[in-house]
Image (tube, grey):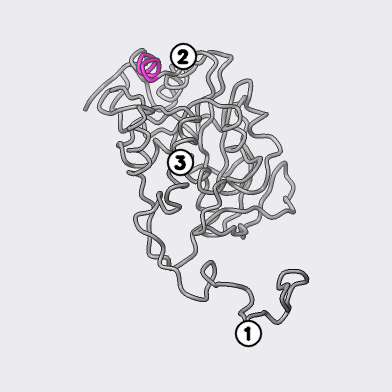
Amino acid sequence: MQTYSAADLSAALLAIGVARGDLIYLSTRLYGLGVMLGARGRDDFLSQVHASVRSVIGAEGTLVVPTFTQQVGRFGLPYVHEETASLTGVFGEFLRARPDGVRSLHPVFSVAAEGPLATAICDAVAPAAFGFDSAFDRMVRYGGRVVCMGFDYYTGHIVSLMHYVETSFAVPYYYNKIVRADVFAGGQKVERPFVINVKYPGLGCQFEYRRYIDALAARNAIRSAELGGGMIYSVTLADHMSVGYDLLKTDVYAFLDRPPAYTEGQIPFDGPPERMNEAGASASNWPGFYLGQ
C-alpha cells in the first residue's frame, strides 16, 4: 500500500497551483491515494486532510465540497437538510458536519462550504440544481479552482462542473425534472419545487469525459501532481468554463459518447408546433408573419 504524509498533501496542492485565499471545489476519493502516515483512525485522518488543505488556502480561502444525495432523487426518500447523508465521499460528510460548514439547500445536488464565501455560495440558492443562482453558478462567478484527489484521469472529476456547463449552455438532451420528495429544513417542510436536469429517456447515449479532458490538456489547463499511490489534479474554473463552452459551440453533443437517438415526433425532436397546409400557411397565420396571405 502506498503512503503519504499530511505535508506531502500540502506540497502537492501547492504544486497544482492552489494558493492562499483560493476558492476550491474539492472532490475526493481518498482511498485512491493510499494511507496517510501518522493518521490515528478515521476522524484524525479526515482532520489532517482538512488541516493540510487549510494550510495552503489559509483562513481567507473558501473550501467547497459536493454533498450530493442521489438517493433522494432516485428513490423519492425524504431529504432533511441538516441530517441527510451525502453519497459523495467521507470528506464531504466531514465538512458538512463541521460547526462552520454551510450547506446549500437542494435535495439532490447540494454542496457544503466553509470560509469567507461559504454563506455567499450556499445561502438562499435557486431551486434548480445547476441553473442560474445555484451554488455552482455562484462558484463560477467568484472564480477559483476545481481540485480532485485520488481519481483516475478520465473518470470525469477533472471536469466536475460539466453538468453546470451543459445546463447553462441549454443542451437539447436535457429536460428539467421536478424532484418528487419531501424536503425539510429548520424543522419545517419546504413548500416549493426543486429541479434537476436529466437526459430524456431512451436516447441510447452516455456521458463521455475524454474529449473535454483532452481539450483542457491541449490548452495546458490541467495541473497535476503525484501523491501517495495516486494523483491530484486542478483546473481553474475560468478554463473549465471556457473550454467546455467552446466544445459545445462546435458540437452540442461533445460531452456524449454519441449523438442521441431522438424519436421523430417526440420531445425534443417533435418538429414545428404547427404544420403548413397545402396553401403554404398555418391555420393560425400569425399577424404579419405570412404577409402574402
Q: Residue at x 62, y 60 (%)?
A: 180
Circle nearer the N terminus (3, 2): 2
Q: Is residue 263 above or below residue 18?
A: below
Expressed as whole percent of the image width and height from the top left, the position of residue 67 reads 52, 39
Q: Which residue is mark 3?
A: 246
Q: Which stretch is magenta?
A: 9-16
Q: Quadrant of residue 231?
A: top left
Q: Callout 1: 10 Å neighbours few (<14), some, many (20+)? A: few
- Residue extending furthest right? 287
Q: Is residue 13 magenta?
A: yes
Asked whether 259 or 147 is in front, the reply is 259
Q: Is residue 38 magenta?
A: no
Image quarter (top left, top right, bottom left or bottom right) of the C terminus: bottom right
Which residue is under mark 2?
Answer: 56
What residue lies at 63% left-to-right and 24% top-to-bottom?
Answer: 117
Asked if labels 1 and 3 touch by Cβ distance under 8 angstroms, the answer is no
Which element is circle 3 on?
helix
Query: Percent from the top left, x then y, of residue 40?
Result: 37, 20
Say which of 254 and 67 sits in front: 254
Q: Quadrant of the N terminus?
A: top left
Mark 3 or mark 1: which is in front? 1
- Sequence-earlier tag: 3 or 1: 3
Residue 4, by quadrant, is: top left
